[in-house]
Amino acid sequence: MKLRLIMPLFLVALLGACAAGSTVAEKRATILKMRADTLTKLYKLEPSARARIRTAAGYGVFSNIGVNLIFLSAGGGWGVVHDNKTGKNTYMNMGSAGIGIGLGIKDFRGVFVFTRRKNLQWFINKGWDASAQADAAAKAGSKGDAWAGAVDIAPGIRLYQLTESGLALQATIQGTKYWKDRELN
């Protein structure tokens, strides 16, 4: 019985970690398009984010898919971190697992804004994030609603979350790992 619950979680995490495309150039292009689309949506919802990102040390944009089944949660995704000083993009993957109460699946975007250079470098090189979260989302295309907002997750790091689609109600404690994508960098 437990295996039936755990397998879908890890399957979603693995699928979420794969950027669309068969070549390195196609995968990078997919990620950069996702970044541009996400920033456009963010600037519409939160106009002040544009100035924050422009003046920050750097920022990261990630596409995430998360699943919650009763007491377990898992997720996966991919994205890119941009260093505003050097102009360099670092392509990354992410995976998460956690415990808590929840049910549902959610496709969302995360935009990290690093106001301090040391936080940007730490994220690229270490990439850990442990967090607790609670949210509700019910969205399909342009229908439905989901909370989208910013939270300071650490001194010098702000996170905006935008729900693309999904139906989820959850309160979980999760560990998330971000790491450099060896193929794309």
Image (cartoon, helix red, strand yellow):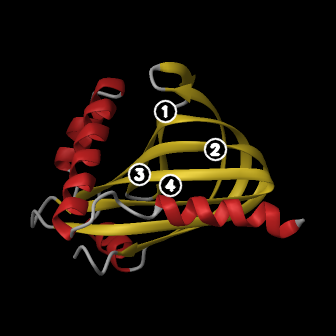
Q: CA distance from mark 2 to mark 4?
A: 23 Å
Q: Amino acid at mark 1?
A: Ala
- Tally of marks: 4
Q: Amino acid at mark 2?
A: Ile
Q: Amino acid at mark 4?
A: Ile
User: Residue beneath label 3, please?
Assistant: 63
User: N-terminal of the two: label 4 or label 1?
Assistant: 1
Q: Amino acid at mark 3?
A: Ser
Give the camera-side residue of 95 and 24: 24
On screen, residue 72 above or below 180: above
Q: Where the N terminus falls, by quadrant?
A: bottom right
Query: How dense is the environment of label 4, judged by Cα within 10 Å: few (below 14), some, or many (20 and up)?
Result: some
Residue at x 76% of width, y 44% of height: 103
Q: CA distance from mark 2 to mark 1?
A: 16 Å
The answer to whether the residue labelled 1 contacts the one labelled 3, judged by CB atoms less than 8 Å apart, is: no
User: Residue beneath label 2, please?
Assistant: 105
Residue 135 image-quadrant placement = top right
User: N-terminal of the two: label 1 or label 3?
Assistant: 3
The answer to whether the residue labelled 4 contacts the one labelled 3, judged by CB atoms less than 8 Å apart, is: no
User: N-terminal of the two: label 3 or label 2?
Assistant: 3
Foreground label between 4 and 3:
3
